[in-house]
Amino acid sequence: MTLLQWKPEYSVGVDSIDHEHREMIDLINDIYKRLESDTNEEQIEACLGDIFSTISMHFALEEKVMRNSNYAEYQAHKEDHENLLDQIRDLMDDYDVDSSAGAARLEQGLSSWFAGHFSTFDARLHGELAH
Ligand SMILES: [Fe+2]
Ligand SMILES: [Fe+2]
């Protein structure tokens, strides 16, 4: 089962950013499948590590762009990024205990974060920068 589907309303209107967002969704879907199918622990750990670094890099880039342009919503946007990174860290911490709990955590927390963040914070940011 696929956890997250790309939706047209996620598009921020900048192709390179949309491309990175789609990659993030693909990574999350991949780990979700692995958690559901009980893939071995090392593979899961490697995937979580990849997800964390890919997403961190994307966030660092957006935050740099915001700082450089004195973007008014910087603080709130950054806090929402930190919220997702915290959720991924929590997942990394407790998936060892129970991998189905890890899948449930992805379903509950991360899917709503993706739906929310792209179409609000990122849409406003990239919409403004595009002008
Ligand atoms: Fe963002
Ligand atoms: Fe983004």
Image (tube, grey):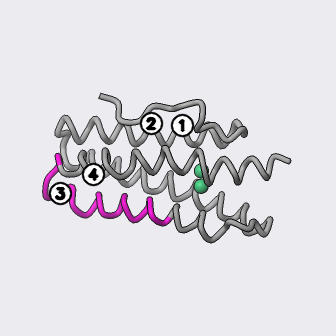
- Residue at x-position 42% and y-position 47%: 112
How far is disc 4 from disc 2 in space, using C-alphas? 17 Å
Task: Check disc 3: other Cα within 10 Å, few if <14, some if 14-19, many if 20+.
Answer: some
* Magenta segment includes 87: yes
Q: Nearer the viewer, residue 20 or 109?
A: 109
How far is disc 1 from disc 2 in space, using C-alphas? 6 Å
Q: Amino acid at mark 3?
A: Asp
Q: Report the disc number at residue 35.
A: none
- Residue at x-position 48% and y-position 46%: 114
Q: Is residue 27 left or right of residue 41?
A: right
Q: Amino acid at mark 1?
A: Arg
Task: Check disc 1: other Cα within 10 Å, few if <14, some if 14-19, many if 20+.
Answer: some
- Labelled pair 1, 2 in contact (Cβ < 8 Å): yes
What residue sits right under mark 2 in the picture?
Answer: 26
In this view, 17 is above or below 45: above
What residue sits right under mark 4 in the picture?
Answer: 105
How far is disc 4 from disc 1 in space, using C-alphas? 20 Å
Magenta stretch: give its range: 82-100
Q: Report the disc number at residue 22.
A: 1
- Residue at x-position 59% and y-position 67%: 76
Of the image marks 4 and 1, the number of the one nearer the N terminus = 1
- Residue at x-position 45% and y-position 36%: 26
In this view, 69 is above or below 54: below
How far is disc 1 from disc 3 in space, using C-alphas? 27 Å
**Image coords of residue 81 (percent x, y):** 52, 61
**Image coords of residue 1 (percent x, y):** 29, 28
What residue sits right under mark 3 in the picture?
Answer: 96
Badge 4 marks a residue whose secondary structure is helix
Of the image marks 4 and 2, the number of the one nearer the N terminus = 2
State ligand 1's quadrant.
bottom right
